Image (cartoon, rainbow, N blue to C red):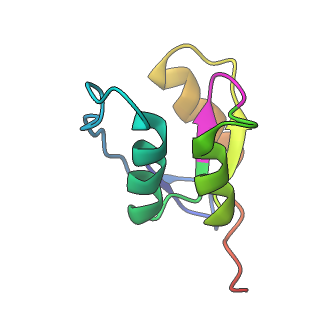
């Protein structure tokens, strides 16, 4: 989803299938790479990725991960719209 940093309004939402779902190994890393390629700034997750392969891919790309207790897409959207992403800064 894309959220306006100016007013917190939802600009665009896209739901994508996980093409790595059936992959035996490194599916999390592959998904992380795909999300980075899509330009994701913030990723809401249900459990910490700390110490796992995807966390390194995401951190290296400057993607912020936030843990959420939300259990539905509606709750996640509400949470995300209340906490707009901080814009990326060039290194």
- Which residue is painted at 74% across and 37% down in the image? 51
Q: Residue most toward the top?
A: 71
Q: Which residue occupies the foreground of this view, 63 or 70?
A: 63
Q: Is residue 59 above or below residue 50?
A: below
Task: Give the image location of residue 64, x and y in percent.
Answer: 69, 53
Q: Quadrant of the C terminus?
A: bottom right
Q: Is residue 83 above or below residue 40?
A: above
User: Total of numbered circles in the picture?
Assistant: 0
- Which residue is painted at 40% across and 35% down in the image? 27
Task: Give the image location of residue 82, x and y in percent.
Answer: 69, 41
Residue 58, quarter of picture: bottom right
- Which residue is painted at 68% across and 85% down in the image? 90
Left or right: 21 with respect to 60?
Answer: left
- Could you tell me if residue 11 is visible in this image? no
Would you say residue 46 sits in the magenta stretch?
yes
- Which residue is painted at 57% across and 22% down in the image? 75
**Over which residues does the magenta segment extend?**
43-48
Task: Give the image location of residue 56, x and y in percent.
Answer: 66, 52
Residue 17, quarter of picture: top left
Q: Is residue 58 above or below residue 44?
A: below
Would you say residue 13 sits in the magenta stretch?
no
Left or right: 83 with respect to 80?
Answer: right
- Could you tell me if residue 64 is visible in this image? yes
Task: Give the image location of residue 25, x and y in percent.
Answer: 40, 31
Q: Residue most toward the bottom?
A: 91
Q: Is residue 89 above or below residue 27?
A: below
Left or right: 58 with respect to 16?
Answer: right
């Amino acid at each position: 989803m894309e959220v306006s940093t100016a007013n917190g309004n939802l600009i665009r939402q896209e739901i994508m299938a996980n093409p790595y779902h059936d992959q035996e190994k490194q599916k999390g890393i592959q998904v992380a790479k795909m999300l980075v390629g899509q330009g994701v700034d913030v990723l809401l997750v249900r459990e910490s990725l700390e110490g796992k392969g995807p966390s390194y891919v995401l951190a290296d790309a400057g993607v912020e991960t936030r843990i959420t207790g939300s259990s539905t897409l509606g709750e996640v959207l509400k949470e995300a719209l209340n906490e707009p992403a901080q814009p990326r800064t060039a290194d």
